[in-house]
Image (cartoon, rainbow, N blue to C red):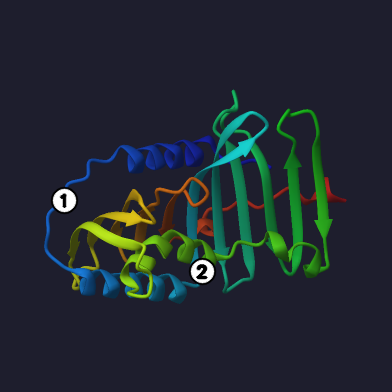
Amino acid sequence: MNMTKKLLTVFFAFLFAIILSACGRSTGGDEDDLRELLDDIEASVASWDVFSYHRMFHRFHGTGYLSIVESKHIDDLEGRIMMRSWNLADEDVEKERYWIYIEDGVAYVYYDDLMGEEETYTKYEDPAQYESDLPDVRQDLSLSLYLIRRALNEDYYDTLFEELEIEYDRESGEFDVWVKVDDRGTTQEWRTYGDLENINIESPYENVGTLLFEKKDFFEDFEGIDKTKFE
């Protein structure tokens, strides 16, 4: 599958900019404002028909951790989904290790093992065979917000705010939030910033990772896949 170097280079640069971004913070709200913002974020993402989201996280493999980047592009209007994955430890960092493309109820799956010794191309025409691999946007978003939802819920006495700094411009949709939470005896920091069409979330948990949800049409410039490899 031919993916442009330019797209991937821009994406990696943007992800690293997220991680290294300066945390310019100032107070301007409270827990009620934060609760409202989280509701608005979830409602916004749920309303999108065409969008992309990206995640960088760490996965334990063998004797150490791999840094994985996943991109997921969804077009609910046309029933298309593209998922891609990279291992940042690869010498050829632009090499996709896995992708699944879904069109007209058919899944085209590419997989390259971690050693780069074997490539497989598999086609599934039965949705039940691949549906467990499909991106669950609401689950990923809920996981990234879970720590803060827990702190906001008075039923959880073991997860409490230590510090909260929030700015939320409801007119423009722009926001910047930094939170320090005592989560069951361990201090954790969490951040989200952007606007309601470009949502960045930095979770302290490795299995959740750093996420970017954006209202953007990946398929507008998508050149398709080489379906002859699946025959």
Query: Are the residues flagged by discs 1 and 2 in contact, CB closer than 8 Å?
Result: no
Q: Is residue 193 left or right of residue 210?
A: left
Where on the picture, by quarter, is residue 14?
A: top left
Asked if 133 appears above or below 188 in the picture, the reply is below
- Quarter of the image where the N terminus is located: top right
Front residue of 70/31: it is: 31
Q: Is residue 203 left or right of residue 82?
A: left
Front residue of 135/6: it is: 135
Q: Amino acid at mark 2?
A: Arg
Q: Residue at x 38, y 37 (%)?
A: 16
Q: Is residue 169 left or right of residue 181?
A: left
- For label 1, the SS is loop
Asked if 38 appears above or below 110 in the picture, the reply is below
* Outermost top residue: 91
Give x and y (percent) for residue 176.
23, 57
Q: Residue at x 22, y 75 (%)?
A: 32
Report which residue position mark 1 lands on: 25
Q: Which circle marks residue 138 in the picture?
A: 2
Asked if 216 appears above or below 20 in the picture, the reply is below
Give x and y (percent) for residue 83.
62, 53
Q: Amino acid at mark 1?
A: Arg
Q: Residue 215: tell me if it is visible.
A: no
- For label 2, the SS is helix
Give x and y (percent) for residue 124.
82, 60
Q: Is residue 25 left or right of residue 103?
A: left
Q: Residue at x 17, y 47 (%)?
A: 24
Few, some or many C-alpha atoms within 10 Å of disc 2 (few <14, some 14-19, many ≥20)? Answer: few
Q: Which circle marks residue 173 in the picture?
A: none
Closer to the chain start, of discs 1 and 2, is 1
